[in-house]
Amino acid sequence: MKSILRKIYHTPRKIRKKRLDKHAEVNPSPIFVLGNQKSGTSAIGALLAEATAQPATIDLEGLYEPIQTKLHKKEIPFQTFVNNNKYDFSKEIIKEPSLTFLYPEIKEHFNVKQNVFILRDPRDNLRSILNRVDIPGNAGNAEEEYNKQWKNINKNWMRVVDSRWLGLGGENYIEWMAHRWLKSLEIYEQYKEDFLLIKYEDFTKDKKGSIEKMAGELNLPVVNDISNKVDIQYQPAGNKKVNKKEFFGEENLARIERICAEKMKKYGYTPFQ
């Protein structure tokens, strides 16, 4: 029954998308807003678009499973994927965290100018992801201890929680996500000349000022005052007030800090250990 209702719900959207794609032209040099999931990309991408009055794509539905894994396996050519989603790729600003891990393909197929990479403390980043999928941070093996919740995780979010499909290692779900955080940062560092780095923690201290400064560095004129929009929730919020040690427990917190320690120190995130 659920599959039937889902099909009924999505059919009109698919028809509309097909019509929009038919008449759209791909922007050869958009600004990509990238970074790991739940690092603040939605808020920053949306506010940047609002401040500069630029058309934006906030998340690519065309990248949902099984398309994402097929792209990584080269079962679908990247150019075909772009052509199948012309409307989303026609915008000036494109925010899609999953494209972070396809950045070599982006660089090959687009006339890359300056993009944006959002970085967040890995402990807050992972906690926010787990809040989103309703899984605690202090389990040894969440897939066993929280079997029911684990099975109910949306397939697209499961690709974020369990990144072994990207060839990343780890002994449990915390380590899988820590390696994903590390991988996203390594991609930024490999192509850092293409990116403007924004730390989420700096953005939250002065959202309006950060967006306007970012726009200037991207050569986008600021035309709208976003003062009344900076606190809009663009994605379901995580519990930012929770104590990290209590949320993860000593063992899982140590896993994160062991895997991410070098980069945490490099970018100003102080480990507890």
Image: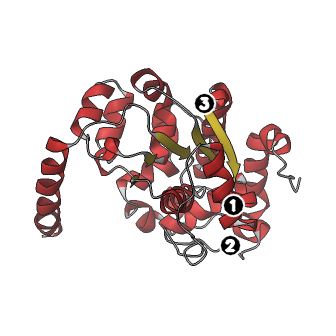
The amino acid beneath tag 2 is Lys
Q: Secondary structure at mark 1?
A: helix
Please identify the quarter of the rendering in which residue 126 is found.
bottom right
The amino acid beneath tag 1 is Asp
- The first of marks 3 and 1 along the sequence is 1
Task: Tell me if residue 16 comes above or below residue 68 in the rendering.
Answer: below
| Crowdedness near tag 2: few (<14), some (14–19) or many (≥20) residues, C-alpha within 10 Å | few
* Numbered circle sitting on residue 245: none
| Crowdedness near tag 1: few (<14), some (14–19) or many (≥20) residues, C-alpha within 10 Å | some
Residue assigned mark 3? 194
Residue assigned mark 2? 240
- The first of marks 1 and 2 along the sequence is 1
In the rendered structure, are the residues bearing label 2 and label 3 in contact, judged by CB atoms less than 8 Å apart?
Answer: no
Q: Position of residue 76 (x, y in %)?
A: 27, 28
Q: Position of residue 84 (x, y in %)?
A: 22, 37
Residue assigned mark 1? 124
Choose between 18 and 168: the one closer to the eye.
18
Please identify the quarter of the rendering in which residue 90 is found.
top left
Q: Secondary structure at mark 2?
A: loop
* Mark 3 to mark 1 CA distance (whole Å): 26 Å
- The first of marks 2 and 3 along the sequence is 3
Q: Position of residue 30 (x, y in %)?
A: 44, 38
* Mark 2 to mark 3 CA distance (whole Å): 31 Å
Q: Secondary structure at mark 3?
A: helix
In the rendered structure, are the residues bearing label 1 and label 2 in contact, judged by CB atoms less than 8 Å apart?
Answer: yes
Please identify the quarter of the rendering in which residue 110 is found.
top left
Residue found at the very far top of the displayed protein? 108
